[in-house]
Amino acid sequence: MSGMRIALLIGGLLLAPGCVVHSRSEPRPGPSRPPSRPASMSYKEAVDRGFGECRSRRYDCRLKEAHLTGRDVWKVKFDASAPGARGHLHLEYDAFSRNLLRVDEKVKARRDRHDDWDDDHRHGRGKDKKGHAHRDD
């Protein structure tokens, strides 16, 4: 019986190295980089988007100014007009997402056809019209 034990022991020792399981973990990926930020909207793109917004509101627009703020916001300002009305359209766009953030739209109907939309140009006309002295301008 001792011979058989020795044979089993030797057989077991011979088989054991082949049965060893090596556990090796997959190499861990390095820290993932955040997705790259899209390129900032250019001056031309901001102005083009502004004109598109202006047209969608059925205005004739004349660009007054466009500039990028330190908060990555494009401010695009227009003089806006429609038949019988004048005013302004100011738009703000996020420079990276390109979302329209704010709209300031003040386009009002003119009072009459001869009005230059600005009351200051009418002072002093008419019998009972109260004006202001020229030095008050």
Image (cartoon, rainbow, N blue to C red):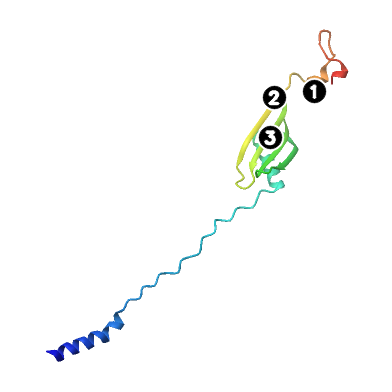
The answer to whether the residues at label 2 and label 3 have Cβ atoms under 8 Å apart is no
Residue position for label 2: 108
Which of the two discs, 3 and 1, sits closer to the camera? 3
Q: Residue at x 73, y 41 (%)?
A: 66
Residue lying farthest left? Answer: 1
* Label 2 to label 3: alpha-carbon separation: 14 Å
Instruction: Describe the element under mark 2 as helix, strand or loop.
Output: strand
Mark 3, secondary structure of its residue: strand
Three-letter amino acid code at the position of disc 3: His
Question: Which comes before the other along the chain, label 2 or label 1?
Answer: 2
Residue receiving disc 3 = 90
Kindly indicate the quadrant of the structure image that contains residue 109: top right
98, above or below 123, in the image: below
CA separation in Å, label 3 and label 1:
22 Å
Density class for disc 2 (Cα within 10 Å; few <14, some 14-19, many ≥20) is some
Residue closest to the eye, 112 or 93: 93
Query: How far across and how far down the image is residue 71, in percent?
Result: 65, 43
**Residue that badge 1 annotates:** 116
